[in-house]
Amino acid sequence: MVFSSHIFLYCFLPIALVLWFAVPRRAQHLVLSLLSYVFYGWANPLFVPLMLCSTALDYVSGLVISGQTPALGNSVSVALVRGGTRTFRQKAALTITVLLNLSLLAFFKYFNFGVDSWNQLMQGLGWSSAGLDTAFRVTLPLGISFWTFHAISYVVDVYRGDARAIRNYVDYSCYVAMFPQLVAGPIVRFQDVAEQLSERTVSLEKMACGVAFFSFGLAKKILLANPCGQTADLAFGAESPGVIESWTGLLAYAFQIYFDFSGYSDMAIGLALILGFQFVRNFDAPYRSESVTEFWRRWHISLSTWLRDYLYIPLGGNRGSSLRTGMNLFIVMVLGGLWHGASWTYVTWGALHGLLLVGERAMGRKSFYSRLPRPVRITLTFLLVCLTWIVFRANSIPHALRYYGSLIGLTDSTADAGLVTALICRVDVYVPLAAAGLVTWLAPPTWDLTRQITWPVAMLILVLLWVSMAGLAIQTFNPFIYFMF
């Protein structure tokens, strides 16, 4: 189930809101947990027991680490002293839980990838007999990359003393399964919502802000991401698109993935606000960045900060030599690419960004790049990011290389070239691209628009919501990119 669907907007969401506000405060977390399991299991109910088992494991581990005991109705707990000495039992509980969560993620997300990569390697070496002849294939549970990261952040925060362990199992289940952030983030770290699970306020102002966030996010998805996505699919699906078609498709994909994901994040943040929760900001106009380093401070912020705090800093961060710091950056970005998907294209994408970050760090702040005019720096950064999106979007490395060639006219014309040109080089294709560009570089970010909802902003919200709902009714193309991650 996705937010931009009829079943969610007209059935699930109204029922969820009625139940949430109808039950007493002490029962809200139970209701939200049950609703979230329905939301998660809508596509495949078999994934729900998997999440329940993982949730129970992490809950018990948090209690062991903090020295607490379970409690059905009492959520009071004591935080560990930051920097204090931890016992062998606490260290073992943390290690086992993190390894089990990573093993769960690795099995479901990378088993097929590992088998296929091994067989391709053996075939390339001429040792086909050493390949793994198995018909067993693993189905990827929705959102497993997100809720395993939630679980890891919980036990690590408790271990470090950054948050209190939850004694009430229902409260912890609510944190993990909360449907606004369940399958596509943002990655809500436990320490950011720990206090809200025990005490939060619900107000008309917060609900109005939530409706505004949701409306802007839905408009991004329906009015910008979907039309751009159709164009991107045409270009990347063509055997050898022309130069104009290739650049148009690349630009379309850059806008699709941005508005698709940032729109979903806005909707998640809006739904959480309506329920009384405040999530962290996940996008901050990333295509206005003046460097790739700045881009990663603005793009998918919850993932970037998670990788920084739970991977980059434990690896040593920038505390060592320049070479060691560069290696840490590169490793984190490669693993970040692998987190996005089980494919060498994602690994390559992460490696490219790792090289760009290391290169920028090596150049320093006084490089020639920093002396360029700001519009030039923004343009060059956007171009670099777009070029890396090719390998992210491509079906394979050879496909990505062919597409790079088509950008400069190195591919031969094929029989479908005229059809591709006719489908892409049209006014109704470039209008959404132009609108996406205007919103990307000129419009205020959602967080600024919702800071104070004036009457003009309120009218804009109502118009966008109405147009988006109408567009959803007639659109047949409505994918969500990050569901595959």
Image (tube, rainbow, N blue to C red):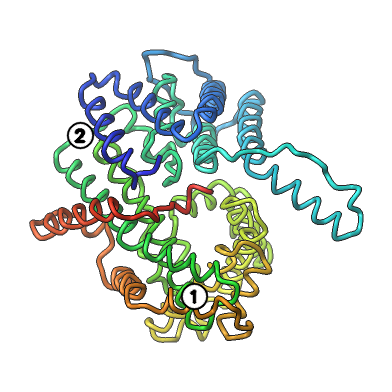
- Secondary structure at badge 1 equals helix
Q: Earlier in the sequence, mark 2 or mark 1?
A: 2
Using a 10 Å C-alpha cutoff, classify the residue at mark 2 as few (fewer than 14 neighbours), some (14 to 19) or many (20 or more).
Answer: few
Please give the residue where the numbered disc 2 appears in the rendered image.
202
Between 15 and 376, the one nearer to me in the picture:
15
Q: Which mark is residue 375?
A: none
Q: Amino acid at mark 2?
A: Val
On screen, 158 above or below 409? above
Whole-percent x and y of residue 450?
Answer: 21, 54
Which image quadrant is residue 126 in? bottom right
Q: Is residue 421 left or right of residue 430?
A: right
Residue located 41% across and 31% down the image? 175
Q: Amino acid at mark 1?
A: Val
- Asked if residue 325 can be seen in this view, the reply is no
Between 117 and 207, the one nearer to me in the picture:
117
Which image quadrant is residue 425 in? bottom left
Please give the residue where the numbered disc 1 appears in the rendered image.
420
Whole-percent x and y of residue 57?
Answer: 57, 24
Whole-percent x and y of residue 76?
Answer: 38, 20
- Asked if residue 250 can be seen in this view, the reply is yes
Residue located 56% across and 28% down the image? 50
If the image is split into quadrants, where does the N terminus sit?
Answer: top left
Between 420 and 394, the one nearer to me in the picture:
420
Whole-percent x and y of residue 62?
Answer: 52, 26
